[in-house]
Amino acid sequence: MRAIAFYIHPMSESMSVDALVNYACDRRLQQDFPEAIAACKKAILIESDRGDLYELLGRFLQDLDAKEAAIRAYSRAIALQPNSVETGEAYFQRGNILQATGEVEKAIADYQRVLQFKANLPYTYWNLAEALQKLQRNDEALSCYQKALEADPNAFPAEKHYDIASRQVKRGNIDAAIRLYEWGLAIEANQSNTGDRDMLWRQYYNFGILCRKQKYLDRAIAAYRKALELNPTPWIYFSLGNALFEKQDFQSAAACFQKVVDIHPDRIEAYQNRGNCLQHLQQYDAAIDCYLQVLSVRPQYIRTYKALAIALQDKGEQEQALTCLQYQLPAPLEATLDRIKKQRYENGDRLRDRASVRYTAIHPHQSIVLDPPKTIEPELHVTFKLNRREIPKTCVAQVSNARAVFDFDTTVFDAENKIVEEVSTACLYEKISADKIANLPYYSETVAFLCLRSSENYFHWLFDCLPRIELLRLAGIKLEAIDRFFFIAQNSAYQISTLELLNIPKDKLLRHPTQCHFRADRLYIPSVLGKVDSVPTPWQCDFLKRSFLPFATVKSRSRIYLSRRSTPYRRVLNEDRVVEFLTPFGFQIIYPERLSFIEQVSVMASADVVILPHGAGATNTVFCNPGTKIIEIFAPKYVEDFYWTIALQCHLDYYYFLGEDPQQYYREHNIQPPHYLAAYCEDIVVDLKKLAAVLDFAGVSVRY
């Protein structure tokens, strides 16, 4: 009782040091910081050699945001006991103030001093990591973040674990990332309220991806199944199927892939993988049927022909297998493929109007054959041998009282909560409660739903995303009558510029970085372009030319080389030598990322010869004049057809050749090969003799 009575009385002259400290702490709890500071200072006058009193004073001064005075107090505490474990808190708090005031190097020194006293302090490691990050010492920072989370996983929310895990993945530290995901998921599992269910499935899914990458298949399978409980989407079934296949549980894997195509019949990768499962189960006819489903959508899929050959060989049909190895189909399979295509593309029911859904058909399905490119290579690459393409029909759906979801995939629901399959790519959030639906954002307006995966990629933005606006126009819909335009956008300069040039008002734009889920009174949804394969068409090229060429400034005809020097992958390693070689031919080096969108259009509209390594910058060849010579350089293991197709549609004079294997270049120049995720990232080395040969072949001579 005396202690309680003591605290409520004002500070007295006769108080002991301990009493003054207790009084000061009480005043601090009451947020009477000046009185707390006064009591602490009085205690210091009595015992001026106690570092803990100066540390306490520093805390009180921090409460008042008196940073300089707090630093002096902490510094005095440290000076009195520089090598004492008890001084660690003073170093830590002084480091926090120094970091906040921009003296980051000094803050780092203080945090490191704390860790000399005691190594497993999670918040010290975290704050040290934050300071190192400010100095761009990213590898050191990442190491400290990891140590902070390892020191006490429960000291931080699950989101911190996932964030650092994603950084570890980018560094190739997969096992470190797996540990972080395990801790993060354990934290969420121990919480009575697991938070955002819509985000939790994603963490289980990402965890599964990492475990599968490291061949921890049982853990991956368990993670995918947990994700499916929360969100049964085709991509999770697909990933689970892959993990089961690698575990050689072919029956279960085949069931997963069947689930994918039941939800989304155009997901050709699932047909391919289901066929592989059935082949292992010696169900060859069913496997062959799956492979033909793939070719009905993507006839240029190289590995499908190889898989067909294996299935036919196992059936004992050697001659037909040899035909498939030539990337052709035997007559009986060609006839079966025609029947599958007819069933897939001539199904009139898919565009049948219903109560709250009206369709406007725009383009019919087309099968086209592309002319071969020109090359100095001894043999045409198989990518260009497989020159048939299937171009799906297009339409625009108008849905009343609609619900729309974008989360990598697209799902649109009508007024009866039925999926509008023609403009959906998956079945997302179908089974959610009426209460949740009622609480979704609602727009009592006319909305154009234009969200599309890969919108952050320049090629897909121009050829898959923006032409959907043209589909609206072709359906007779006036853009000024639309109240809201939904995009998945990263606010890149080219995205902003192209939308402005298309006269889409800023106040009508709704940009979502990764996902959205809403209801609308009236929804317009054009066909999802590129949902299986991006095949540039004449109408897309014409739309882009009509929309943007009038704003270009066309100069005298020029020869240009597009650099990828600033990109993190698929760089031309010997670019300096390439540029030096091209200089006598009058080539200018162009860095697309340094130019505005219209400046890039103007450069291409002014070019008569363009040399470029394969990459998104080649998308702008759509703005070249007919007859412009295009010379594309590929990495030896990554050859794609996008820009060959654009060249044919725009009547350009297209050539290509392959670069050399970069591994020898890395060895000769003592370079550590980069950690790339896949073959599409592989760097390019240009053989100058090949470059000279292709220039000669194309009739491009030295300019004197």
Image (cartoon, rainbow, N blue to C red):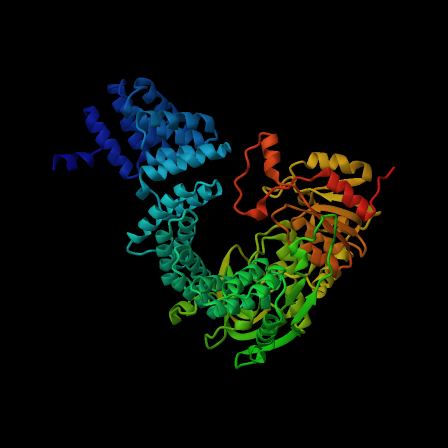
- Which residue appears at 34% of the width and 36% of the height? 122
Q: Is residue 279 above or below residue 73?
A: below
Quadrant in the picture for residue 454? bottom right
- Farthest-out residue, left: 1
- Which residue appears at 39% of the width and 41% of the height? 176
Q: In this view, does 139 lie to the left or right of 673?
A: left
User: Which percent across, then down, holds residue 116?
Assistant: 34, 25
Q: Is residue 652 above or below residue 111?
A: below
Q: Is residue 695 left or right of residue 69?
A: right
User: Which percent across, then down, holds residue 290?
Assistant: 51, 67
In this view of the protein, can residue 484 be seen by the observer? Answer: no
Q: In which quarter of the image is the N terminus?
A: top left
Q: Nearer the viewer, residue 484 or 639?
A: 639
In this view of the protein, can residue 105 be seen by the observer? Answer: yes
User: Which percent across, then down, holds residue 604?
Assistant: 76, 50
Q: Is residue 92 above or below residue 454?
A: above
Q: Nearer the viewer, residue 156 or 91?
A: 156
Quadrant in the picture for residue 74? top left
